[in-house]
């Protein structure tokens, strides 16, 4: 049985080149006691994978050069040697950028897809993406009905959900996104109160107009210049869930620190970094709420599907040039 | 009756020049109904006054050009026209850089000095300085007995108290200060566990040695390069009470943002800006605790007294060249 894999062979510096990952085909080794063989069906592509490729200080060990590239997957068990799962089970985990994953005891988690629900929802709304938005917005952002909430990368997988959760909490929500199509999607389809197109509008000036009393919650996916524009418009006691710094990922340098960092002091703001894995013990609490909001039509999402494992490196770049639309996944194989 | 005053006539750019404040002598006007005349005895000099001189966005209105320079004072009431205080009362408030202050109804607050206690303690340990350290460390830093706490400007008025409060909470405390004398003072006299002399030692490297498990609490008075050195050594879930950014005050630019801002995300740290005035309703809760710790010998402080209102501008510069030792005050007049 053949296993096609993407191997990390070089760490990115600046824009991601085409020589970071190498395509390799190996034999699937025999299973050891307690192991399951999982056929990967879908691979999640996330901005954080750009971090895992580097060896800067980070929240998980960097992917070692020569190892299969790390990625979240959804798959089905095709063989088991007394492993945690039965043949046919759906398993989510770090199945990596490959066709087959050998899940050891304790690795991954089983789930039962809802009838009719696409598998991709377990990456999106009911997976790490949705949980990131849920805990970041509600636990750190704590939006109140009287608040003005700003979300960057607002048409992205996490940002679009985070903004809608703030709407559900009753807040006024302004999304910052790149391009007219994205801005229209978040206002017309998702119900954001306003959008700022950072590619064509001066963000700080527009924020001053749209949020004259200041920004109470800023869900930050980007860092960089957008963060600076928001820091110039903070309300007293603002909360800033720090979810990502994507503006700095695709460069060889550490993300530039905010120029207006001092406004965190002046406005007595709170910046709190978080990683969705920290909330793993509470995923089960978030999932039914997200599912219910989705069923009620309050929470929409879209999925951007690329086909074929061989296209994963090219697809990953879409996250950094702004061309993806919603949760980006690669379909490795169809669910039989 | 003559009133000598320092008038702000120019906003600082870069290093504070000698032409920012102008010396003026005016007549004290007659009191209006409800006003008290307070003879200022002591003037507090604080790094934040450098901010008030500028017109960057800040937490109080900037001092207007042509106005008396703002400053906290301790004084005694010498006349009252039905005002809030009686002649002879001790009053603390924004009495400004001048000999006499006309306190309107509701301005300032009366206090009774403890017998034997120097007036300066009401600026220092039992004033804004002590309260800043108390609330910043305990409410935001939340040091636990197992924590490693780092304080910058650790021999300064606030830092020295903040570090001692973390010691009282049972934490291991490392102070960062400039020069051997300051480092010796905080370790030998104040009981800090270790000191790093940022003028002669590589801070990031020394932190890695002294705090191999990372920094749980960083009480930040300075920002700049010292903040970056700490960000490289954060423990998971670190708390960073952001008290001041003095490294950037004495320059014409906004304080440089931290280069390793991304580590706030990676280590899921929290940065929270605070201003002592926010805690005014709770000062009465802090004062007896600080006084008790002082009486028990657990909390020491030192005062750096300059004599004569005419010397205030020169004295203020000591806060930015690192030459002050402890809480800096100007004695305007002796308590009769």
Image (spheres, coloured by chain):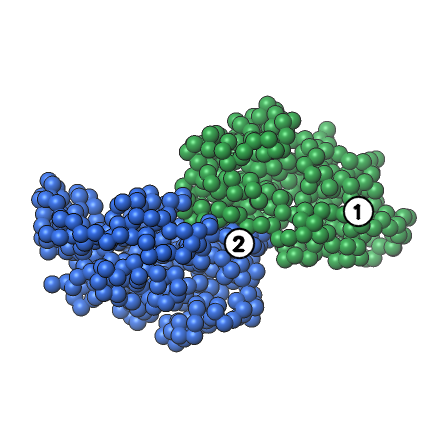
Chain colours: A green, B blue
Res B323 quadrant in image: bottom left
**Residue A232 in sight from this viewpoint:** yes
* Chain letter of disc 1 in the image: A
Q: Is residue A243 above or below residue B330?
A: above
Front one among A226 and A120: A226
- Numbered mark located on residue B258 in the image: 2
* Chain letter of disc 2 in the image: B
Q: Residues within 10 Å of mark 2 (few under 14, many from 20)?
A: many
- How far across and how far down the image is residue A310, in percent? 83, 42
**Residue A283 in sight from this viewpoint:** no
- The residue positioned 26% from the left and 50% from the top of the image is B7
Marks 1, 2 in one chain: no
- How far across and how far down the image is residue B108, in percent? 21, 49
- The residue positioned 81% from the left and 40% from the top of the image is A311
- How far across and how far down the image is residue B333, in percent? 17, 61
What residue sits right under mark 1 in the picture? A18
Dot 2: what SS?
loop
Residue A154 is left or right of residue A213, and the answer is: right
Dot 1: what SS?
loop
């Amino acid at each position: 049985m053949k296993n096609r894999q993407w191997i990390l062979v070089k760490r990115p510096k600046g824009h991601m080149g085409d020589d970071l990952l190498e395509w390799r085909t190996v034999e699937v080794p025999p299973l050891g006691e307690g192991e399951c063989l999982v056929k990967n069906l879908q691979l999640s592509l996330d901005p954080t994978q750009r971090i895992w490729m580097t060896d800067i200080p980070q929240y998980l060990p960097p992917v070692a050069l020569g190892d299969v590239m790390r990625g979240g997957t959804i798959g089905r068990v095709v063989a088991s040697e007394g492993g945690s799962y039965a043949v046919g089970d759906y398993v989510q985990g770090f199945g990596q950028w490959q066709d087959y994953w050998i899940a050891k005891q304790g690795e991954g988690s089983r789930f039962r897809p809802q009838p009719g629900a696409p598998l991709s929802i377990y990456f999106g709304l009911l997976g790490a993406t949705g949980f990131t938005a849920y805990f970041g917005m509600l636990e750190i952002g704590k939006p109140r009905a009287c608040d003005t909430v700003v979300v960057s990368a607002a048409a992205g997988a996490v940002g679009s959900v985070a903004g809608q959760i703030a709407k559900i909490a009753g807040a006024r929500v302004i999304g910052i996104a790149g391009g007219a199509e994205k801005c229209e999607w978040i206002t017309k389809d998702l119900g954001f109160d306003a959008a700022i197109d950072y590619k064509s509008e001066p963000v700080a000036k527009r924020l001053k107009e749209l949020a004259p009393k200041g920004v109470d919650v800023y869900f930050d996916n980007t860092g960089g210049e957008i963060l600076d524009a928001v820091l110039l418009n903070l309300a007293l006691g603002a909360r800033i869930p720090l979810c990502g710094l994507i503006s700095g990922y695709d460069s060889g340098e550490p993300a530039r620190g905010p120029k207006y960092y001092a406004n965190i002091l002046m406005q007595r703001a709170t910046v709190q970094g978080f990683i969705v894995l920290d909330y793993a013990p509470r995923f089960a609490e978030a999932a039914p709420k997200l599912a219910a909001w989705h069923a009620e039509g309050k929470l929409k999402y879209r999925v951007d599907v690329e086909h074929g494992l061989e296209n994963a490196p090219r697809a990953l770049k879409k996250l950094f040039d702004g061309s993806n639309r919603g949760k980006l996944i690669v379909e490795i194989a169809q669910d039989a």
